[in-house]
Amino acid sequence: MFIERDVNSHKKVGTIEVIAGSMFSGKTEELIRRLKRAKFARQSVEIFKPTVDVRYSENEVVSHDENSIRSTPVENSANILLLSGNVDVVGIDEAQFFDKGLIEVVAKLANMGTRVIIAGLDMDFKGVPFGPIPGLMAIADYVTKVHAICVRCGSIAQFSHRFSEQEQVVLLGEKEAYEPLCRSCYIKATK
């Protein structure tokens, strides 16, 4: 017996994808790759980043390999909910710099049927879970943990070691301020 279904009665379900790891691990590169695939599939896409991240560009998400995609800088997580409208996919880069309200914003978007893809550092330079990333990983449908290569021994690196003596958690920088290290080299470097 054939059962006829109303195609419109099936509500679209969103998802939460988190791409997390250390600096130089390819988080932003993977975010850009996923967002470009969604655009190629003719899905509507909005990309957000924190206004504090102006290292490469004010209005683009840019990877260390200089791949880029247009984005909207926002002051706080509530603005993402206001500006995302009725889109299929929302991308968020450098999520560790957002407030903890990002967890609720992302959950609301996914519950409304939006695919949300987030990239961010899972730990700060002290090896401590960073900002809203741990909470986002907990509610995510999919978590991708990416790794860099330790610049001292060539092993898999999961730590972002800071050269600077400055203690503030947020310190924008690149290769002049940070290096990816494995656990063993990180322990040696921080003693």
Image (tube, helix red, strand yellow):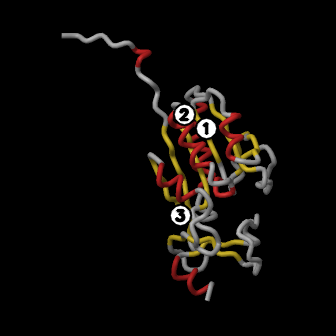
Q: Disc 3 to disc 2, how far (Cα)?
A: 27 Å
* 10 Å crowding of disc 3: few (<14), some (14-19), many (20+): many
Q: Nearer the viewer, mark 3 or mark 1?
A: 1
Looking at this view, is 142 or 128 the one in front? 128
Relative vertical location of residue 121 with respect to residue 149 in this rendering, above or below: above
Q: Disc 2 to disc 1, how far (Cα)?
A: 7 Å
On residue 90, the disc is: 1
Q: Position of residue 141 (x, y in %)?
A: 44, 46
User: Mark 2–mark 1 contact, CB under 8 Å?
Assistant: yes
Q: Disc 3 to disc 1, how far (Cα)?
A: 23 Å
Q: Position of residue 74 (x, y in %)?
A: 75, 45
Q: Helix, strand, or loop for circle 2?
A: loop
Q: Position of residue 72 (x, y in %)?
A: 75, 40
On residue 147, the disc is: 3
- The residue sitting at 59% across, 30% down in the picture is 40
Give the residue type at disc 1: Val
Label 3 or label 2, whichever comes before in sequence order: 2
Label 2 or label 1, whichever comes before in sequence order: 1
Relative vertical location of residue 172 with respect to residue 116 in this rendering, above or below: below
Q: Helix, strand, or loop for circle 3?
A: loop
- According to the picture, the residue beneath numbered tag 2 turns out to be 114
Q: Helix, strand, or loop for circle 1?
A: strand
- The residue sitting at 63% across, 64% down in the picture is 23
